[in-house]
Image (tube, rainbow, N blue to C red):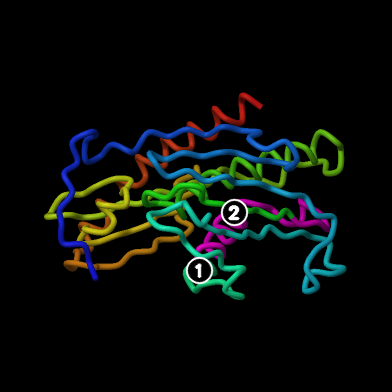
Amino acid sequence: MKNTSIPNRTERADNEPRKLSIIPHFLAHADGSVLISCGNTKVICTATIDENVPAFLKNQGHGWVTAEYGMLPASANGRMRREAAAGKQSGRTQEIQRLIGRSLRAVVDMEKLGSRQILIDCDVIQADGGTRTASISGAFVALSLAVNKLLARDVISENPIREAVAAISVGTLNGKLLLDLDYPEDSACDADINVVMTASQQLVEIQGTAEGATFSIQQLNDLISLAQKGIEQILAAQQQALAAN
């Protein structure tokens, strides 16, 4: 059931994103890792280099990037049962990890990556809305760190990453356009839209639904423009994290 309480955004402007932090090399053993925090949402993103490719890519001379996503039991209110204990992934989990994989593959030249794959893991340790968008933005940095390791070892001669990619949510609430929804806003908003965009302002994916009220084409365009401004700030934070590498 839709949350009928209307959140009051007092700590930031409607067009202001949540406080963002990207900490590279968060884990010691991963080929690339970050802790990304978007407000109270926190996700550990790791990248692992695998010198094998899926069966459908055998002997084709190019690689693959794929992702897995999960939420820790205590990441949200009340303990969530581990999906491994249930014996299967939820439809939501499968949808999100496919979105992360598509978003990253959109900016990677698979031929330059060579006959190997990079496995991305996004583990939500604390959820307050926007876990999928935070995962995409953090996963790109983890992927870049792993690729830098391949370049440093002369395993590959060219960087397969064409450009950066990031994601953010936008929505409408009582006629207002809101950037970077937290959970109360996400639960109460009239429309909820996730936008994935590259550094060259190319759209990778738009996921949007009218949950409380329909929205016009003009509102959609305005929401995408608002998301673009938020993504520009995420891209800058990504660059800063990678420059500190």
Which is nearer the N-term, disc 2 or disc 1? 1
Q: Residue at x 72, y 36 (%)?
A: 28
Q: Residue at x 59, y 54 (%)?
A: 104
> Badge 2: how crowded within 10 Å, few (<14), some, or many (20+)?
many
Q: Which residue is mark 1?
A: 95
Q: Residue furthest left?
A: 174
From the top left corner, tell me how far across and down residue 111 is, in percent.
76, 56
Q: Which mark is residue 104?
A: 2
From the top left corner, tell me how far across and down residue 216 is, in percent.
19, 64
For label 1, the SS is: helix
Q: Along the horizontal axis of the image, is 154 left or right of 67?
A: right
What's the magenta region? 96-117
The amino acid type of the residue labelled 2 equals Leu
**In terms of depth relative to the viewer, which is nearer, 110 or 22?**
22
On-image quarter of the N terminus: bottom left
In the rendered view, would you say 51 is above or below 233? Answer: below
Type of secondary structure dominating the magenta stretch: helix
In the rendered image, which quarter is residue 61 located in?
A: bottom right
Q: Along the horizontal axis of the image, is 137 left or right of 65?
A: left
The amino acid type of the residue labelled 1 equals Glu
In the rendered view, would you say 17 is above or below 136? Answer: above
